[in-house]
Image: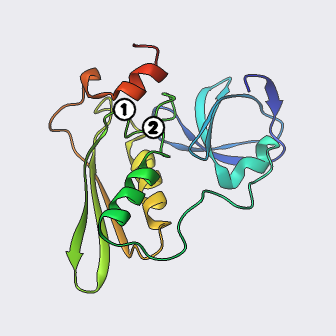
């Protein structure tokens, strides 16, 4: 990590913090600054960008055939809610090396009763309301929840009340950030 590499092929990336999609040409020199939660934050001459795990080969990284370990049988009740929280802990803000749960960005997570369907609703926020990465982070969270067997729908809503502050970071998150 933190050594310069050359992209092996053209690849789609999300600019940080705007959230705009860009195509980076093959041969672009980049530095991987963060590799957490299945995505890669890279530094380019134009700034930071995020590349998803499905495009890891463009960085010269072999894809893990096993992927994230998720249960095979549908979960119910407390087991399902616990599994959802674990999935959310694998979602990272591309600029901060702490997961969204430990950052205190997830305000609520619940299994909503629906007619013969399993629906998960999550309310989360961002460290700054103007962050263009919000939809990308929310989509990442939704995708991780949908990977759980038996989940029929995942709704991830960005909310701004109460406003996020550093006091919401968990003790584990504070330790990772060197705040303790």
Q: Secondary structure at mark 2?
A: loop
Question: How many numbered tags mark residues here?
Answer: 2
The answer to whether one can see residue 10 in this image is: no
At x 38% / y 52%, what residue is drawn? 85
Which residue bears the numbered disc 2? 99
- Quarter assignment of residue 159: top left
Tell me if 120 is positioned left or right of 146 in this view: left
- Quarter assignment of residue 161: top left
Label 2, label 1: how far apart the Cα atoms are: 6 Å
Tell me the number on the disc at residue 131: none
Image quarter hosting the N terminus? top right
At x 28% / y 33%, what residue is drawn? 129
Tell me whether the residue at label 2 lies in contact with that at label 1, contact meaning CB atoms closer than 8 angstroms: yes
Which residue bears the numbered disc 1? 103
Tell me if 92 is positioned left or right of 5 in this view: left
Tell me residue 158's x, y (percent): 27, 47
Most foreground residue, 123 or 11: 123
């Amino acid at each position: 990590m933190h050594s310069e590499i050359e992209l092996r092929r053209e690849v789609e990336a999300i600019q940080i913090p705007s959230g705009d999609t860009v195509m980076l040409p093959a041969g672009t020199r980049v530095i991987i600054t963060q590799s957490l939660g299945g995505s890669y934050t890279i530094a380019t001459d134009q700034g930071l960008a995020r590349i998803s795990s499905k495009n890891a080969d463009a960085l010269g990284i072999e894809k893990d055939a096993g992927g994230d370990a998720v249960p095979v049988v549908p979960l119910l009740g407390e087991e399902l809610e616990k599994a959802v929280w674990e999935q959310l802990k694998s979602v990272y803000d591309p600029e901060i090396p702490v997961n969204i749960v430990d950052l205190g960005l997830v305000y609520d997570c619940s299994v909503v009763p629906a007619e013969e369907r399993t629906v998960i609703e999550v309310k989360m926020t961002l460290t700054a309301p103007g962050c263009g990465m919000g939809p990308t982070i929310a989509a990442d969270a939704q995708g991780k929840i949908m990977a759980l067997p038996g989940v029929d729908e995942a709704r991830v809503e960005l909310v701004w009340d109460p406003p996020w502050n550093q006091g919401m970071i968990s003790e584990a998150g504070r330790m990772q950030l060197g705040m303790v």
